Image (tube, grey):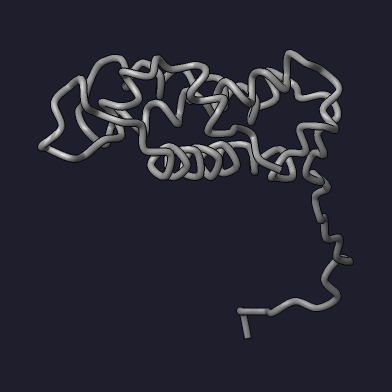
Amino acid sequence: MRYLTVDEVKASVPADVLARLTDDDPSHSITEKVIDDVKIEAAINWAEAFVDARLAKRYVVPLNLDGIGSDGARDLVKEAALQMSVYRLYSRVEREGVARDKRELADKTLSALASGKIEIPGAEERARARIRYKASEPRFSVKTDE
């Protein structure tokens, strides 16, 4: 299941900023720039892959957001995906402190989720069973004094 849609990104980021981050046509002035949904979709795909990679240590991914029993936990995952998407869009055109801050915030959230400091109620966790081997005592030895 998807964590984020293009429309959710558009609702969260001002249109003029999205146009500046996605319109690569150098002939467009700042007022002529248009939003490129394909570039937003690419940023979302990258962000969702990043989220899945971080959470795969603890949870079965992709997460089923409908199965998560907490609106807050669902919102944390969506917000992390949004922040990483915006970071990816910023990183296309410039290395700006805003983008770095968004990535660091999302990464901290994902780390807390992956480590279990923050739980995702209803998300399927990976099995943590350890395989243990038990062997009997050795029945022979090697004598070195002969």
Q: Residue 82 at what x, y percent from top left? A: 51, 25
Q: Residue 47 at what x, y percent from top left? A: 49, 37
For the N terminus, the image quarter is top right
Q: Which residue in the rendered view is the most extreme toward the bottom?
A: 146
Establish if 59 lies above or below 32.
below
Q: Which residue in the rendered view is the most extreme toward the front?
A: 32
For the C terminus, the image quarter is bottom right
Residue at 38% from the left image edge and 19% from the top image edge: 15
Q: Residue 36 at what x, y percent from top left? A: 36, 38
Establish if 11 lies above or below 128.
above
Q: Is residue 100 left or right of residue 30?
A: right
Which quadrant would residue 73 be assigned to in this image? top right
Q: Which residue in the rendered view is the most extreme toward the left?
A: 27
| Closer to us: 94 or 58 | 94
Which quadrant would residue 104 be assigned to in this image? top left
Which quadrant would residue 144 be assigned to in this image? bottom right
Establish if 118 lies above or below 57.
above
Residue at 77% from the left image edge and 44% from the top image edge: 126
| Closer to us: 15 or 81 | 15
Q: Residue 119 at what x, y percent from top left? A: 75, 21
| Closer to us: 33 or 84 | 33
The total number of labels drawn is 0
Q: Is residue 102 left or right of residue 7?
A: left
| Closer to us: 73 or 57 | 73
Residue at 11% from the left image edge and 37% from the top image edge: 26
Q: Is residue 4 left or right of residue 130?
A: left
Residue at 69% from the left image edge and 79% from the top image edge: 142
